[in-house]
Amino acid sequence: MANLCFIGLGTMGYPMAGHLANAGHTVSVWNRTHSTAQQWSSEYQGSAHDTIAAAVKDADAVLLCVGRDSDVRDLMCREACILAHARPGTLVVDHTTTSSTLAQELHQLCQQQQVDFVDAPVSGGQQGAINGQLSLMVGCDEAVYAKLVELTQPYTKAIERMGAAGAGQATKMVNQICIAGVLQGLSEGLLMAQKQNLDINKVVSVISQGAAGSWQMVNRHQTMDADDYDHGFAIDWMRKDLGICLDEAKQLGVSLPLTALVDQFYAELQNLGKGRADTSALLHRMRQLNPDQ
Amino acid sequence: MANLCFIGLGTMGYPMAGHLANAGHTVSVWNRTHSTAQQWSSEYQGSAHDTIAAAVKDADAVLLCVGRDSDVRDLMCREACILAHARPGTLVVDHTTTSSTLAQELHQLCQQQQVDFVDAPVSGGQQGAINGQLSLMVGCDEAVYAKLVELTQPYTKAIERMGAAGAGQATKMVNQICIAGVLQGLSEGLLMAQKQNLDINKVVSVISQGAAGSWQMVNRHQTMDADDYDHGFAIDWMRKDLGICLDEAKQLGVSLPLTALVDQFYAELQNLGKGRADTSALLHRMRQLNPDQ
Amino acid sequence: MANLCFIGLGTMGYPMAGHLANAGHTVSVWNRTHSTAQQWSSEYQGSAHDTIAAAVKDADAVLLCVGRDSDVRDLMCREACILAHARPGTLVVDHTTTSSTLAQELHQLCQQQQVDFVDAPVSGGQQGAINGQLSLMVGCDEAVYAKLVELTQPYTKAIERMGAAGAGQATKMVNQICIAGVLQGLSEGLLMAQKQNLDINKVVSVISQGAAGSWQMVNRHQTMDADDYDHGFAIDWMRKDLGICLDEAKQLGVSLPLTALVDQFYAELQNLGKGRADTSALLHRMRQLNPDQ
Amino acid sequence: MANLCFIGLGTMGYPMAGHLANAGHTVSVWNRTHSTAQQWSSEYQGSAHDTIAAAVKDADAVLLCVGRDSDVRDLMCREACILAHARPGTLVVDHTTTSSTLAQELHQLCQQQQVDFVDAPVSGGQQGAINGQLSLMVGCDEAVYAKLVELTQPYTKAIERMGAAGAGQATKMVNQICIAGVLQGLSEGLLMAQKQNLDINKVVSVISQGAAGSWQMVNRHQTMDADDYDHGFAIDWMRKDLGICLDEAKQLGVSLPLTALVDQFYAELQNLGKGRADTSALLHRMRQLNPDQ
């Protein structure tokens, strides 16, 4: 069992840190809003700290799950933050979805201090975090991978080392790009179904196993049909991710026409007050533009 | 066992008619190119006719699986064709993907002759036709549905009555619209993966079970990665179908921005000589526009 | 001076026929709604007929300005219509915007009766028709062009023979495609200007003479800024024209991604009740999707 | 006459600084590549400096015309740069196209040193710079505008104060957005014209005065028809500008679907080796996707 530090107790990090504590590790947590850390330490075996220094000190590994590139950079590099306190040999695991550029930068910076940095964004959503059934896409040196697999086992269903630093984030980008296409196509398909008074459940039951089938079709058609988007992965976060995709594509000299277009559709949904809604709300937008007469 | 007439022995119809013959029905076939009908009758128990009149005469049911709206209309309505020879009580089953408008027109026309018309487009591809594992989306009167289920059982894995005349075709349109979105998104995702030198098999293994997952991702990523599109559902046929989608959307007053855009991308693939390639060749187009430096 | 028949007294045809009458020609008119023809004949020197036969009989030239391909085809080919009554040597001038395919078909059909068919769609709008300042894009045999120029002189500012039958319509398509791009770009530009509280008049005064400048910018920025679209060229007609563009592009094997997308945006404007609004209402759509907070 | 410092002797800045010298001002120049500054000082009355400090010292006004936000920020804020040497009362005029956010930041920063900062991006291209016929879109305090007008008079055809700091840049963004739409529409229109063998000169002569007309149509149709793009405003710079547009739109919460799409098309042109080509090369891309058979 190890001394672990977990930073960022949001909808994902909170249960993830809990799985580590339940597995018998000694877990120190820190969260921007300290009361959440205190709540966590009342629910799980582990200690809440009000400074990063205190949380990181003595940790064999530091795990992060926060919001944006700038959050991760600040937590890692600012005065009195992780890199100021991590001992040589510490493993730093970033579960945040960030740019792979950031992951590469931090990997280099950590290397100078004999700290191992791993980018390990996750998929599986809040449900996956609660059930300990996440998928991890990992970018790291080969030498640290076995340690990572063991460490994250309590909340991981599938894990894959995709390559060196940044490769985990690159894979997460692929994931988000695919989702954007699936969802706009699904929204147009379901719109046509609704406008022709087809029974959406019947439609999905007959087409979801074939060439048109997708996770989103199977798992979201009922809520989409009910115009219910109070769940799932928020558009505000999706725009952050698509912004990273489009920036990295620009640096790589790659065009992503559909991704760029759907990103603008999501901007429109934010304007329509749906920033907190699930990404499947692309159908909501289509219905605003195609109201029933 | 019944007297059946099957019209249209293409990649789909040929094995479908075969399943009916193997099930013990008396099957008469007709095909525009007569030699294909003769070949069929040498492979299966059944008779090849060189006129539609001869094939249709005495049939309890006539099944069609041809190309376009105009083909179906001609075969049904032209002089000396199906409606000129079908007896009252005949069941006509159209497995062609057509507009639902055509299905509704033909349903009405047949009704005047006491003929039952059913639109029953299929999905499952050539492999599904050969293995007798097709999915049927059906538009018909409730009264004839049970007869249809029994009749098509030899090549059907799933069947669903979607509503009255035209509802089967409407459902097929939903299917094709969803595919268009999935595939352009998948193409952009895989392009990003390739440009970052990720191992496509690993990428798919880690993301295909989650929110980005789709039938196309699971079944097409390897051929897409290999730039191999000599299989599957041809772009030329997809454009026919998307043309129907966009026409029906216009009549319904529905906008389909992504579908319209991907339809134009397919036009470009036709121009690039890929009209016979699988619909997943959208990645091929993206690679032409993003060549390796 | 000649005996002329003018068919179709809409916003364009009404004043055009008037210019011919004012120029001293003997003009017979026919209109689907006969009362409009009667009103015309009370305003201008000329006779209103209630059958096409009566209007066409004795005409040296027949001019049409109606709505759609199907209207032109019916008026030309149906029983008791133009071709049934036109004498050899008659010049038929179609000012309707149609497909060039139709123009080519009708040209061939007319040739068999020694009738000369000319496609001559116009631009310049209602104001141009009233002021006799239209631009004509002409497809015809070289031999009849001089006669056409003389005949249409009363309402024409610019005329150009673009090529053989259909070339006039092909040119009109180019015109409409260019408009679609200009207007969506202009709408996005003005939206950004509005959202940053720039004075639209100042913006246009400083950029309209340069690389961003366009007729639409100069002539529509004030009404767009005022969200006023009760004028100009209706979206319902634009969709008809863009439909022709996209159909002809498909036949030619040409992709038009932006045109296809803007056509869908216009579908959304029709759904939002703006089918009669000017084509510049693309900004109205953008504002629905980007409301002020 | 004043003591002026001009920084950035590119295709625009070089002749602009020359006009100031020719007008009788005392001009000190600085350029990243010093030899260009020396060449300038051999062609015009004025002195080339190899440090910014030397160039800025004693200047009543400092004018910049460089490349990117980061260039301007560095030149203004880095050690031993403009703000380190500008005296209170100096007027700093930035002719670079940058984000309006940068302009606002620099305005604030300058204010603290009693320096007046003006954003004044230009349009008119290299030709306009050489002929002294540029258009200036200005963001500044009202108090300094008169001084600016007088100062820039030697190379200015039109000048407009658009509002406070950043408003000049905001206006330039509107300009670039409009251009993107015009050019993709024009490219699709001319492609259709080419594919139908229309004479492009005739097409433009008949449609350019009407609703489809634009500066780009009039000034670029011949080079576009000849597939010649070795002139004008480079795609690499356009992508920089569209990147600013899309970033600012994201901050404002504004969607720009067409702009985002055309930006991706330009990425494809960069990939096709056309980064230095004129922005009208969108037709070149369309022709790659629609080759002659």
Image (cartoon, coloured by chain):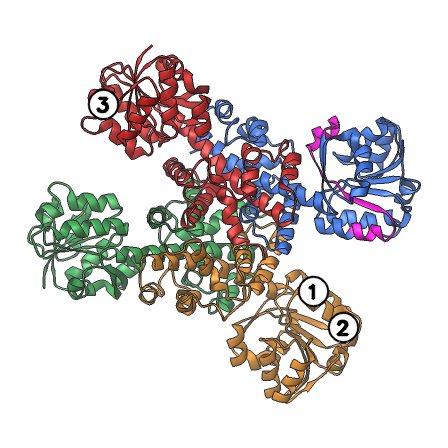
Chain colours: A red, B blue, C orange, D green
Q: Please determine whether, in this image, residue D207 is positioned above or below residue B242.
A: below
| Side of B138 where A104 appears, left or right | left
Which residue, given by chain and number where applicable, does mark 1 sit on? Answer: C70
Q: Secondary structure at mark 2?
A: helix
Expressed as whole percent of the image width and height from the top left, the position of residue A49 reads: 24, 23
Q: Nearer the viewer, residue A27 or A248?
A: A27
Q: Please determine whether, in this image, residue A29 is positioned above or below residue B135.
A: above
Is B123 covered by the magenta stretch? yes
Which residue, given by chain and number where applicable, does mark 3 sit on? Answer: A83
Residues flagged by tags 3 and 2 on a common chain:
no
Q: Secondary structure at mark 3?
A: helix
Contact between marks 1 and 2 (CB within 8 A): the answer is no
Which residue, given by chain and number where applicable, does mark 2 sit on? Answer: C83
Q: Amino acid at mark 2?
A: Leu
Is A199 covered by the magenta stretch? no
Q: Which mark is residue B234?
A: none
Expressed as whole percent of the image width and height from the top left, the position of residue A220 reads: 54, 36
Task: Report the span colored magenta.
Answer: B106-133
Mark 3 or mark 2, whichever is nearer to me: 3
Q: Quadrant of the C terminus of chain B?
A: top left
Instruction: Determine the chain carrying the residue at label 2.
Output: C
Query: 10 Å neighbourhood of mark 1: few (<14), some, or many (≥20)?
Result: few
> Which residue is drawn at the image coordinates 84% and 42% (left, top)?
B91
Instruction: Determine the chain carrying the residue at label 1.
Output: C
> Which residue is drawn at the image coordinates 49% and 27% (left, top)?
B207
